[in-house]
Amino acid sequence: MKNNKAKLLAAAVAMGISAQASAAIELYNTEGTTFSVDGYFNTFYVHSSVDGGPQGDNDQSRVKMGFLPNYIGFNFSKKIDDLTVGGRSSFWVTINDSDATRAGEAGRGDSLGTDSGIDVRQFYATVDGSFGQILIGKDFGLFNRAVILGDELLIGYGQSSDTLGLVDGGNVSFGNIATGYTYPFPKAQITYRTPATNGFQLAVGLMDPNKSDVNSEETAPRFEAEVTYAGEMFSANISTLYQSSDSTTGGEDVDTTGVAGGVKFKAAGFALGLSAFSGEGMGTLAGLDTLTLSEDNEVEGYLVQASYTAGATRFVVSYGNSESDADPLLAGADAETENTAFGIFHSVNSNLILIGEYNMTEVEVNGAEFEENDTIALGAVVLF
């Protein structure tokens, strides 16, 4: 069941989502013009023990990056009268280029050398003023964006289902993608954000649409919107999307719809987060491109997380679940994937974090157990 589409999507999602470093290095600041650089580096030792799945029972040890790939980002800002123009470009790199030497990997056979994947996840400009902000260019989508940025495992490892080709995949693990939320894939967009008022902010965007098949017709762009609230002890978000895609060859017309939301409570070192999503005409991973073939595919998922921070150490317990009625990655099968995780994150200082994590991932296909995957991940994150 692990087909080429699954491998391609795993590689695409592997290019990650940004947790922009707040401690960016400022290289230039003169007369209202600034330029800064931020970066993120991580590596994990990972041991997976798989029962079932597409390859059968197997144990595998790897040295890999975690849920977020490594990246370097560049930020620009200039004040001009009542407006501030800015921009960001970020370049995402896989450290697992050595995976290309494995026999048959991507058709490269036993070739030696490196083959680092470099991807541009963000390349956009912004215009800020009293009216709010307009963003033009490529950035992450709005649907499920706040949920994934609030994931307690964002800088950790998360689920690595062998059914999705992640145990031996040359890129990242999936965090809780497909076990609680979908991935807000970066896309060309025009997005407006209101000024933050009493903690509330609205964002609405026109996104480059995703094709339901190679010959489909999209007469309007994809629409996504998000409302967020950020308070000292409580935060919340809700997001939605809509897209219509018509076949020009007698195939199925697909309307893609979705709604997602989450809340998080914080007090005395404790945090509790709850989120959920539901959609039609999309997949459990990202709902993109030719992987979204049918309106019959209804998906839903939820994520429950708790954490406690004591000094420089954060302890996390997480459970996520996603279901799909006609999963395009599994030949239209009814699928359910869940992940239970325990993590410890210790900040040695503001630029170095040590991480230990244990994930238990289970996959059911058409109501029958298909894969059990227990994964231990030990790693470190360096950021600036």
Image: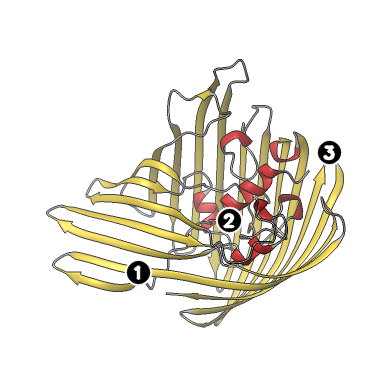
- In space, the residues marked 3 and 2 are separated at their CA atoms by 27 Å
* Quarter holding residue 46: bottom right
> Residue 37, which numbered label?
1
**Nearest to N terminus: mark 2 or mark 1:** 2
Residue at position x 61%, y 43% in the image: 277
SS of the residue under disc 3: loop
Amino acid carrying label 3: it is Asn
Front of the two marks 3 and 2: 2
* Quarter holding residue 68: bottom right
Residue 74's spot in the image, x, y percent? 34, 63
- In space, the residues marked 1 and 3 are separated at their CA atoms by 48 Å
Front of the two marks 1 and 3: 1
SS of the residue under disc 2: loop
Amino acid carrying label 2: it is Ala
Q: Nearer the viewer, residue 291 or 103?
A: 103
Category of crowding for the residue at label 2, using alpha-carbon neighbours closer than 10 angstroms: few (below 14), some (14–19), many (at least 20): many
- In space, the residues marked 2 and 1 are separated at their CA atoms by 22 Å
Residue at position x 84%, y 62% in the image: 58
SS of the residue under disc 1: strand
Residue 326 visible in the snapshot = yes
Q: Nearer the viewer, residue 315 or 243?
A: 243
Q: Which residue is mark 2?
A: 14
Q: Which residue is mark 3?
A: 366
Q: Mark 3 touching mark 2, by CB under 8 A?
A: no
